[in-house]
Amino acid sequence: MNVTLSRSGDVAVISLNRPEAMNALNAEMIDRIGTLIDEAAASSPRALLFVGAGGKAFCAGADIRELLERGAGAHRDAARSGQCTFAKLDRLPFPSLAVIQGVALGGGLELAMACTYRIAVAGARFGLPEIKLGLIPGYGGTQRLPALIGKARAIEMIASGRLVETDEAAQIGLIHQVVEAGDSIDLGVRFLDRLGEPFPAAMRMARTAVEKALSVSLEEGLSLEADLFVAATQTTDATEGMRAFLEKRKPAFTGR
């Protein structure tokens, strides 16, 4: 299988396993990723990791040979399929993390940007080089990149198609952390551990509030925040978290 789902303890792991093509995405892989995201969600892990096999690439983007064979209608269907698949990550009740070794280009970077967190091994490179093929990003890159690094930097990256090194990626907010080389799954689990898992049910609400802040007015955003705050107070995790604070102990969150 070019995409597989496994577990590392209570963390679900989706592996892009096409190293001979630098884990480039074709239509079959996009469909498979969507299916495996759903399967991972059904198993209620504390987080979902994305890793790339081979060490040279997280994912080098779309399969160009496949692109050449499509007509206009098929291109639109493929773009919408990729967008819908990656958007599933926004709706997960737990966080997702892309662990990047090598390159994350085009659709690979778009997948990584759809994750809650991104970490990268020193020496990794990032870019949306579609413009060099006479194309533009089609799996959400033009929408997610400005939200992460700002409009000015995003249009420069997309219009030039240039690759960004790890230090710059961390500086502009494209990735959360640069890490030393190692096994991708281990690196991901260690990063999650430092965040203080398990995550409470309020994690999904926090992500929803932050994401909506970029597309609604301040008044609408504040109203949504208030609604989500109230919803968070009604979770079992909120009761546990507040009691644990008063009792001076670590909370035992269950995601409910």
Image: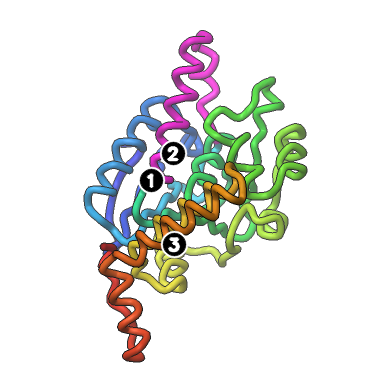
The three-letter code of the residue at mark 3 reads: Gly
Q: Which residue is mark 2?
A: 87
Q: Marks 2 and 1: CB-CB under 8 Å?
A: yes
For the residue labelled by badge 1, is the local secondary structure a helix, a strand or a loop? helix
Hey, what amino acid is under mark 2?
Ala
For mark 2, give the secondary structure: helix
Residue 113's disc number: none
Q: Residue at x 46, y 25 (%)?
A: 80
Q: Earlier in the sequence, mark 3 or mark 2?
A: 2
User: How busy is the neighbourhood of tag 3: few (under 14 within 10 Å), some, or many (20 plus)?
Assistant: many
- Quadrant for the C terminus, please: bottom left
Answer whether labels 3 and 2 touch (C-beta < 8 Å).
no
Q: Which residue is painted at 64% across and 48% down in the image?
A: 125
Q: Where is residue 247, by image quadrant?
A: bottom left
Answer few, some or many: residues within 10 Å of disc 2's Cα (few below 14, many 20 plus, some between 14 and 19).
some
Task: Find the distance from the CA under tag 3 to the CA under tag 1.
Answer: 20 Å
Q: Residue furthest left?
A: 43
Name the residue beneath numbered marker 3: 188
Name the image quarter holding the N terminus: top left
Q: Of tags 3 and 2, which is closer to the observer?
A: 2
Task: Identify the residue under disc 1.
Answer: 91
> Could you tell me how far apart the alpha carbons at marks 3 and 2 are, in whole angstroms?
21 Å
Q: Is the residue 57 above or below the residue 10 in the image?
A: above
